């Protein structure tokens, strides 16, 4: 099953107007500049897809730098990629990792299997430099005396809060719109479809967060209380119960709302992007709008949220000091701007799931509970969990 679905034709997209703003959001210059760094990180990761030796990769976009952490002998292919990158003006380095990715994943799983024994544990994931595990806790001091499978860096995290026009979307529905279920307010995620094994489309719809309608089988409405679609039970994949994702069956098209909570502007979804520490990403929920100054600091995290254990989580924080998300943004999109056409196209990165560390909400927000940090389910994991393909636009 391909993770990237078929391109939407004009007939499927419908006649809904698609106004586009030529204004780029704050953070756009960094997002555009990081494209060759992301390409290098992805190429290096493909040399060792099982992470038998690759410990981690860290981007420094402003410095145009990529740090590669490797345990053991470094393959010639990696040296070749680094030399090519340096020739293109990228400060690419290879540094020694204490642990390989496969070792950290094994330890991460061991901690999560025994999570009830660790007081106040909120999350656990690999350190970007391969130095061990990054462990989140409400009270770090309570965990410092605990025994872990390998070296850990314990950081303080608030309790993870689900961030359960944009407001009056019409068919075919786009990502970033409002999704109401009774008094609950969430956001729509990327447009996806299910396919037969030979590539024929079965049905299509939108992603959203499972905690918006626990158990599924729910009817959703738009922000103006018009019919949006219905969700089934948890997805067919064994990963679905640990992804906090849900599929809303409805008419959908690959466009993402941009701008504020009352914006009618949008960009086409042109594909998906891998996520690496140091990347800059945008969030765009119906509750607080678009924010493009979010720096990724952790990937591949197992998180303990109010809706249970969620795997495949990435974390970012708003480096401008503002809000990355708010309650009601759950299910909404996380993306980067397409470097070749940033005013018109985006690349899917994930689905907003939760927030940490409260901040003042931006003007126009539909909520008073906003967060500087955002947890989002990686798009690759979300699509696998729902056995779905991402709808894309040419």
Image: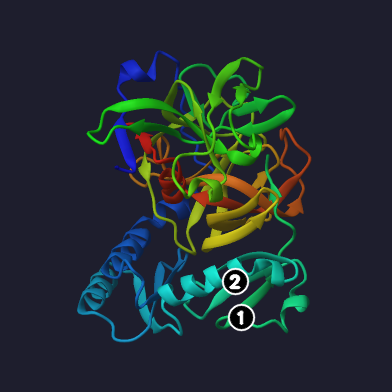
Dot label at residue 236: none
In the image, 2: left or right of 304?
A: left
**Circle 2 residue:** 111
Quarter of the image containing the C terminus? top left
Location of residue 369 with respect to 275 vertically, above or below: above
> Vertical placement of 39 versus 84: above or below?
above
Which residue shows up at 65% across the image and 52% down it? 308
> Which residue corresponds to mark 1?
148
**Is residue 26 at least partly visible in the picture?**
no
Residue depicted at x 68% and y 46%: 162
Q: Position of residue 163 (x, y in %)?
A: 68, 43
The percent position of residue 124, horizontal first and vertical second, equals: 59, 67
Residue 35 on image: x %, y %: 36, 55
Mark 1, Cα crowd under 10 Å, few <14 / some 14-19 / many 20+, is: some
Give the mark count: 2
At numbered mark 2, what does the secondary structure look like: helix, strand or loop?
Answer: helix
For the residues bearing labels 2 and 1, Cβ distance under 8 angstroms: yes
Pick the front one: 392 or 342: 392
Residue 94 is left or right of residue 105, and the answer is: left
- Label 1: element kind: loop
Position of 12 relative to 367 (above/below): above
Q: Which one is nearer the viewer's eye here, 213 or 287?
A: 213
């Amino acid at each position: 099953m391909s993770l990237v679905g078929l391109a939407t034709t004009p007939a499927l997209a419908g006649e809904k107007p698609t106004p586009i703003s030529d204004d780029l959001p704050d953070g756009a210059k960094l997002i555009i500049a990081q494209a060759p760094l992301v390409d290098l990180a992805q190429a290096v990761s493909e040399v060792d897809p099982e992470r038998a030796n690759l410990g981690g990769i860290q981007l420094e976009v402003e410095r145009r730098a990529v740090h590669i952490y490797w345990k053991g002998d470094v393959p010639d292919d990696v040296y070749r990629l680094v030399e090519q990158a340096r020739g293109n003006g990228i400060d690419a380095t290879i540094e020694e990792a204490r642990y390989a990715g496969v070792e950290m994943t094994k330890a991460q799983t061991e901690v999560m299997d025994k999570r009830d024994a660790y007081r106040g544990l909120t999350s656990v994931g690999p350190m970007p430099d391969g130095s061990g595990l990054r462990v989140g806790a409400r009270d770090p001091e309570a965990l410092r005396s605990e025994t872990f499978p390998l070296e850990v860096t314990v950081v303080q995290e608030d309790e993870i809060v689900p961030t359960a026009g944009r407001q009056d979307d019409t068919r075919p529905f786009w990502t970033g719109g409002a999704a109401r279920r009774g008094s609950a307010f969430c956001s729509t995620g990327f447009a996806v479809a299910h396919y037969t094994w030979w590539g024929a489309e079965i049905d299509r719809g939108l992603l959203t967060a499972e905690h918006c309608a626990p158990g599924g089988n729910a009817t959703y409405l738009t922000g103006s209380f018009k019919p949006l679609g219905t969700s089934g039970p948890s997805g067919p994949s064994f990963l679905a119960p640990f992804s906090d994702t849900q599929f809303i069956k409805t008419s959908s098209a690959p466009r993402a709302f941009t701008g504020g909570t009352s914006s009618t502007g949008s960009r086409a979804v042109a594909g998906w992007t891998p996520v690496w520490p140091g990347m800059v990403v945008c969030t765009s929920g119906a509750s607080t709008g678009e924010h493009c100054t979010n720096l990724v600091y952790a990937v591949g995290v197992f998180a303990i949220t109010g809706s249970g254990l969620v795997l495949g989580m990435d974390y970012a924080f708003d480096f401008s000091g503002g809000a990355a998300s708010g309650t009601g943004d759950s299910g909404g999109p996380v993306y980067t701007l397409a470097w070749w056409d940033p005013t018109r196209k985006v690349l899917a990165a994930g689905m907003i799931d939760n927030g940490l560390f409260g901040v003042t909400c931006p003007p126009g927000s539909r909520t008073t509970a906003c967060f500087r940090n955002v947890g989002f389910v990686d798009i690759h994991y979300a699509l696998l969990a729902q056995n779905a393909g991402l709808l894309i636009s040419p």
